[in-house]
Amino acid sequence: MGYRLIIFDFDGTLADSAAWFAGALNGVARRYGFREIDLAEMARLRGRPNREIMQALKVSPWKLPFIAAHIRKLAAEAAPSIDLFPGVADMLRRLSARGVKVAIVSSNSEAVVRRVLGPELAGLVAHYGCGASIFGKAAKFRQVIRAAGVADADVLSVGDEVRDIEAARKVRLAAGAVTWGYATPEILQAQRPSAMFETTDDVLREAGLCGI
């Protein structure tokens, strides 16, 4: 409780980009030669570990950097149509007002993150660790923590996927999981995160800012 730095994931945690991603996925599959899937299979894979999803879609690991770069390009084009989840803007303002540093670590590009946030909210983010590889979030966490100059015990990571929890644990951070993102609450709960958040107010409460 009373964290000095909160590191947020972006897609599925702050930004409601699931519908856009679902619509773009099969086009990416055709371009890079992996399996196309329908909405039913997409729902079954929702929130599964990334390695399991890659196996199901038959994605060649060597293609991952090219796929990620292409998705970032598509995300940049789609940024004007992607909204933040309800309550996110107010949450970021309240954290900043009380002196809690905010960082964003994402596989998306910093330009896209800033575009979706808008100038005001983007200015409230103290540190960006963007362009993370699919399994590279732990390294970005370390960079952000060093830049913020805080102790690991004063940091909370907040994400919506199993990989977010795994990355936080690699660097021994408290790992919070939101229930409104890509992964199902059941899958997240099975990972035994430090905290589960059903609303943005729950995040503020965990940060010790309840009632402000």
Image (cartoon, rainbow, N blue to C red):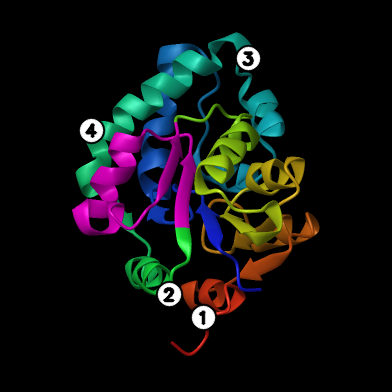
Of circles 1 and 4, the one toward us is: 1
Of circles 1 and 2, the one toward us is: 2
Q: Which amino acid does label 2 sit on?
A: Arg
Residue at disc 3, secondary structure: helix
Counting residues from the start of the chain, the first of labels 3 and 4 encountered is: 3
Quarter of the figure with the N terminus: bottom right
Give the residue number, with chain letter if any, for mark 3. 61
Left or right: residue 37 versus residue 71 is right
Residue at x 37%, y 28% (from the top left corner): 72
Give the residue number, with chain letter if any, for mark 4. 77
Residue at x 68%, y 56% (from the top left corner): 175
How many C-alpha atoms fall within 10 Å of the one at disc 1: few (<14), some, or many (≥20)?
A: some
Of circles 2 and 3, the one toward us is: 2
Counting residues from the start of the chain, the first of labels 2 and 4 encountered is: 4
Residue at disc 2, secondary structure: loop
The answer to whether any part of residue 27 appears in the image is no
Q: Do the residues labelled 2 and 4 touch (CB within 8 Å)?
A: no
The answer to whether any part of residue 205 appears in the image is yes
Residue at x 25%, y 42% (from the top left corner): 79
Q: Do the residues labelled 1 and 2 touch (CB within 8 Å)?
A: yes
As drawn, 2 above or below 27: below
Q: Which amino acid does label 4 sit on?
A: Glu
